[in-house]
Image: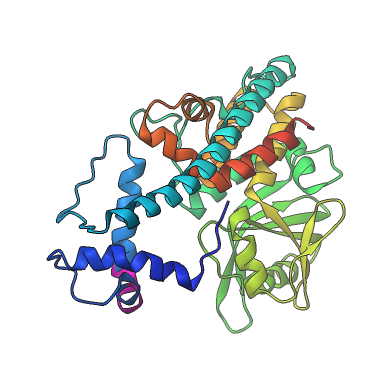
Amino acid sequence: MSSDVEPSDWARLDPWFDAYLGSGSSAGTQRSDRERVLQEPGQEWEAIDSVAQAGLNAKSTLFCSPPLQVTNQDQLTEWWTELDTWWDAFSKAGHQNAIEIADLLEQSNESWATSAAPFETDPLAADITGTRALRGPVQPSGELDWSQWLAQLLEPSAALVRELFGVPSEKSPNEVLREARLPKQDGGRRRADILVRHPDYGVSIEVKLGDENYRKTPETARLIERHYDNVGWNHALLLPKRQRGRLNAVVSPSIDEHADGTREIVWDESGPITILYWQDVATAVRAVLQRGDIVDDHWAANAYLFCAAVEQHISGFQSQPVIDRMVDSSGVVETVRPIVVSDTLDEQLTYLRSRLDL
């Protein structure tokens, strides 16, 4: 959910900040906050971010000193009336999304309970993001950790490789390599994040989380094919869905969306590279688990936790306990949360509906 900002909006906000600046604040004597943001954007956004983060903490208390001084009470009433309209619209939409997600999670729990999976609830049934009680043995902190975890799941599982990449094989990969060194003609080296190798074909996966540098992607694919030239290769670029816009903006040609839902970029240097989102990986893990197509109990437990971690840590989806608190909100924080994560709730709704074929 978003709202367009017009230049005139600044003019309407300026009187608030003029009053604040006139109250003796040490913020300076700029004519408006707009000028201060333009002059020192980093410092100002840090201050704004700190307030937002504090607001998300249920135990936070915000103190503002000196107090905001507004002398025109009629204008103040007008501003609050307009703000109330926005607040009501955003909060109602977010709350309704939370209600729908709660219902979908209940349906999903029933689906898992009747499936062949060794688990009876949806991976989102438990909150594994909280700091008060760390849930699960793994707290991945970067691309290397996530890449290693994914490689561990792919290596013994023909079913997951087949589900994720469409590989027509009933056998697990011969090997799954991590950080494979690829020599360059100039004496330098590249590293391939994950290589899934079968006797006559392979799949390479470039893993992305925060890194948005895609210039090395086609070169890495070309080096893989040159170094391992005895098999045919398919290449995949794995990234969070939220980075799609950035990817499309910086690469040429742009992403080609196919009718079957698959995505690829056809670089001249390397040929086609499939675009995968982390949600695609979680979807594949869900499908394999619910079919009961598991390697063993340990693999299943690892895959189930991985799925929950991807959905909650990378995609930002809200767990069932958090959703339940949004539905029956009892405080300001839980009332505000659906507004703060409104875009994520929209995405989560679409995701869960698709998983339930709704």
Percent position of residue 123, x then y: 59, 28
Vertical placement of residue 87 versus 58, above or below: below
Q: Is residue 155 visible?
A: no
Q: Which residues are magenta?
A: 37-43
- Queried whether the magenta region covers residue 57, the answer comes back as no
Q: How is the image coloured?
A: rainbow
Q: Nearer the viewer, residue 93 or 232?
A: 93
- Queried whether the magenta region covers residue 40, the answer comes back as yes
User: Quick check: 79 left or right of 275?
Assistant: left
Residue at x 36%, y 34% (from the top left corner): 332
In the image as oriented, which residue stretches furthest toward the front? Answer: 74
Residue at x 59%, y 60% (from the top left corner): 243
Percent position of residue 199, x then y: 81, 51
Vertical placement of residue 296 versus 280, above or below: above
User: Quick check: 118 left or right of 356?
Assistant: left
User: Quick check: 88 left or right of 225?
Assistant: left
Residue at x 43%, y 35% (from the top left corner): 335
Percent position of residue 300, x then y: 63, 27
Q: Quadrant of residue 114?
A: top right
Q: Nearer the viewer, residue 108 or 36?
A: 36
Q: Is residue 8 visible?
A: yes
Image quadrant holding the C terminus, namely top right
Residue at x 73%, y 46% (from the top left corner): 174
Q: Nearer the viewer, residue 278 or 64?
A: 64
